[in-house]
Image: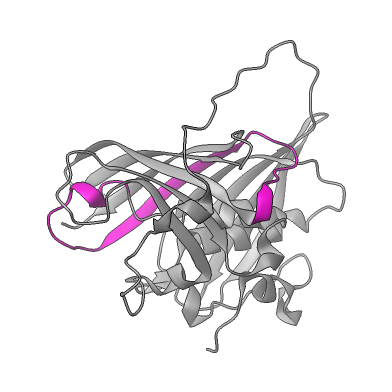
């Protein structure tokens, strides 16, 4: 399939309606499946079409159950519509089998006397940092990575045998059309390789299982599409790893906070 930007995928004719069928172009592949952030963005796009006046997205729970090898059929159901929160479930199927599921909670802002912030770590500006992968590399190891501009702030590349599984970057879509779309943030928040990879001493396959994201702003915004993203390894044992993932805007405001479980075969 020819290459497409994420905005082109979301706006294609087959992607309209309550049960859209999105294309899975080759440039969004990661091994034999689609990039996880791409799959999550498709599920969110389908969920947002179930009702025109949904509140802002507050939380997402994604289950990656099987490889997304081709265009999935996505079904959408409203689990519950309460006074403050609406919960929408989505399932992506290929040949009748579930390959991914997303449960999204949309909520109205509430009056509260509690405000707690976690400011971004100090960092140089995006234009003052080096590319995540060396400029001489002909192409990134994962094809989907070419849809993003990623610049290294702190941490190590994969398979360096590092003491800590930690990476922090500036990242943005190469397509400016995705800088402000609601699906854009969840689509880019998974861009980094698994946090366990820097401590690995040799390459090997991996597979994300579950990913929870909490959205901390009703209208996430940042300058020129740049997000500061970090992934931090919590534990790795018996081929399963757990990592914390966060994202700040260029004003240093935390906008997405999450955790992901990843199976590693190395």
The furthest residue to the right: 53
Could you tell me which residue is drawn at 71 percent across and 74 percent down?
15
Please say if 4 is above or below 201. Answer: below
Quadrant of the image occupied by residue 208:
bottom left
Tell me residue 77's x, y (percent): 70, 52
Viewer-nearest residue: 260 or 224: 224
Would residue 21 be seen by someone viewing this image from the given angle? no
Q: Is residue 207 above or below residue 27?
A: above
**Relative to 26, 227 lies left or right:** right
> Looking at the image, can residue 230 be seen?
yes
Locate residue 129, reporting x and y percent: 44, 53
Viewer-side residue, 31 vs 96: 31
Q: Quadrant of residue 105?
A: top right
Magenta residues span 195-224
Q: Tell me if residue 54 comes above or below residue 133 in the rendering.
A: above
Question: In which quadrant of the rendered view does residue 143 lie?
Answer: bottom left
- Left or right of 198, for residue 124: right
Which residue reaches farthest top? 113
Question: Does the magenta run of residues contain 178?
Answer: no
Give percent across and percent down for residue 35: 45, 65
Residue at 67%, 47% (x, y): give it.
222
Q: Is residue 213 magenta?
A: yes
**Residue 158's x, y, as percent?**
25, 56
Q: Residue at x 74, y 10 (%)?
A: 113
Horizontal side of residue 132 vs 46, given as left or right? left
Judging depth in this view, the residue of 165 and 243 nearest the camera is 165
């Amino acid at each position: 399939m020819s290459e497409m930007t994420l905005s082109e995928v979301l706006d294609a004719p087959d992607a309209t309606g309550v049960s859209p069928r999105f294309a899975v172009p080759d440039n969004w592949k990661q091994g034999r499946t689609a990039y996880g952030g791409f799959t999550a963005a498709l599920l969110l796009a389908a969920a947002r079409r179930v009702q025109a006046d949904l509140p802002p997205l507050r939380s997402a729970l994604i289950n990656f159950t099987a490889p997304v090898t081709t265009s999935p059929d996505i079904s959408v159901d409203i689990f519950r519509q309460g006074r403050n929160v609406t919960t929408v479930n989505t399932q992506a199927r290929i040949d009748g089998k579930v390959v991914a599921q997303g449960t999204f909670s949309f909520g109205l802002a509430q009056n509260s006397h509690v405000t707690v912030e976690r400011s971004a770590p100090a960092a140089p500006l995006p234009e003052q940092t080096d590319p995540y992968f060396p400029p001489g590399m002909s192409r990134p190891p994962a094809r989907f990575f070419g849809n993003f501009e990623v610049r290294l702030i702190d941490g190590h590349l994969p398979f360096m045998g590092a003491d800590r599984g930690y990476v922090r970057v500036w990242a943005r879509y190469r397509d400016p059309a995705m800088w402000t779309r609601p699906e854009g943030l969840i689509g880019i928040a998974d861009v980094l390789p698994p946090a366990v990879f820097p401590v690995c001493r040799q390459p090997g396959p991996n597979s994300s299982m579950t990913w929870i994201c909490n959205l901390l702003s009703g209208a996430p915004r940042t300058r020129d599409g740049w997000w500061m993203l970090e992934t931090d390894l919590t534990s790795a044992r018996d081929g399963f790893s757990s990592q914390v993932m966060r994202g700040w805007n260029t004003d240093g405001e935390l906008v997405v906070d999450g955790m992901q479980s990843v199976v590693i075969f190395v």
